[in-house]
Image: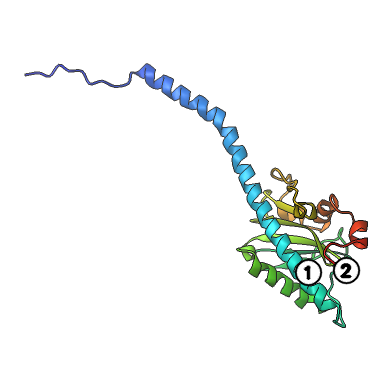
């Protein structure tokens, strides 16, 4: 005996309509998802930069106390950029902010190494990322962080952020991290948007 019942299913027209709806929804949602992804990455890097900033400032308090009685002062007077890379390199602005950052060396090398080691111990996974701090007269003015030297998703945190305001970094940078850290000027300029050199020189925070 034949079974004449027809198997129900979607018609070709119905499938085309469904596919068209999915395509429209994807076109609408894709920009939003992309913006969310970018915002999330920047938020993560800003958080890393904030942790590096706080850890560095905590260590500066120790250097202030130590240097009050030490015969040789730490190299944190004036404006200094100290940059750590995930491959273990430590660079410093030894010839001014417009000059290329140089590998650490000389009598201050161990001081820099100790500071980097202390920050990396304090901040989770800091030794696996790339970060830099701008220090003037024992005050950390600003910091930057990136998960790789080539990325343009760069986190920033400044003394203004430490006062409770949000970071200004809201989207991917036009330049990668290494390009921005070729000298110390980018980070120093970012920090100076909030507290100029004169204000830090005359009234340093956390004396």
Q: Quadrant of the N terminus?
A: top left
How far across and how far down the image is residue 5, in percent?
Answer: 17, 18
Q: Decide: few, some or many residues near mark 1? Use Cα within 10 Å; few <14, some 14-19, many ≥20.
A: many
How far across and how far down the image is residue 132, in percent?
Answer: 74, 61
How far across and how far down the image is residue 191, in percent?
Answer: 82, 54
In this figure, what is the number of numbered marks?
Answer: 2
Q: Is residue 19 above or below residue 71?
A: above
> How many angstroms separate mark 2 from mark 1 (CA)?
11 Å
How far across and how far down the image is residue 140, in percent?
Answer: 79, 62
Q: Nearer the viewer, residue 116 or 57?
A: 57
Q: Is residue 168 above or below residue 143?
A: above
Residue name at image x 68 percent, y 52 percent: 46
- Residue hosting label 1: 60
Classify residue 203 as left or right of residue 40: right
Residue name at image x 76 percent, y 57 percent: 181
Residue name at image x 84 percent, y 51 percent: 194
Q: Nearer the viewer, residue 127 or 1?
A: 127
Q: Is residue 84 above or below residue 159?
A: below
Classify residue 200 as left or right of residue 6: right
Q: Quadrant of the C terminus?
A: bottom right
The image quadrant of residue 111 is bottom right
Is residue 105 visible in this depiction of the protein? no
- Provide the secondary structure element on which disc 1 rests: helix
Q: How is the image coloured?
A: rainbow
- Residue hosting label 2: 77
Query: Which is more N-terminal, label 1 or label 2?
Result: 1
Is residue 157 visible in this depiction of the protein? yes
The image quadrant of residue 108 is bottom right
């Amino acid at each position: 005996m034949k079974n004449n019942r027809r198997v129900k299913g979607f018609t070709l027209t119905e499938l085309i309509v469904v596919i068209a709806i999915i395509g429209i929804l994807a076109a609408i949602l894709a920009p939003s998802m992309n913006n969310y992804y970018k915002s999330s990455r920047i938020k993560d890097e800003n958080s890393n930069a904030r942790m590096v900033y706080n850890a560095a400032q905590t260590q500066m308090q120790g250097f202030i106390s130590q240097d009050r009685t030490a015969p040789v002062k730490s190299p944190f007077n004036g404006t200094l950029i100290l940059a750590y890379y995930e491959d273990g390199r430590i660079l410093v602005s030894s010839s001014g902010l417009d000059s290329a950052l140089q590998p650490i060396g000389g009598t201050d090398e161990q001081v820099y190494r100790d500071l980097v080691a202390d920050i990396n111990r304090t901040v989770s996974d800091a030794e696996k990322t790339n970060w830099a701090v701008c220090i003037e007269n024992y005050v950390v003015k600003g910091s930057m962080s990136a998960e790789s030297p080539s990325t343009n998703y760069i986190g920033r945190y400044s003394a203004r952020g430490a006062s409770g305001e949000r970071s200004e970094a809201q989207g991917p940078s036009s330049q990668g991290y290494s390009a921005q850290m070729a000298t110390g000027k980018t980070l120093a300029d970012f920090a100076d948007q909030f507290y100029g050199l004169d204000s830090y020189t005359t009234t340093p925070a956390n004396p």
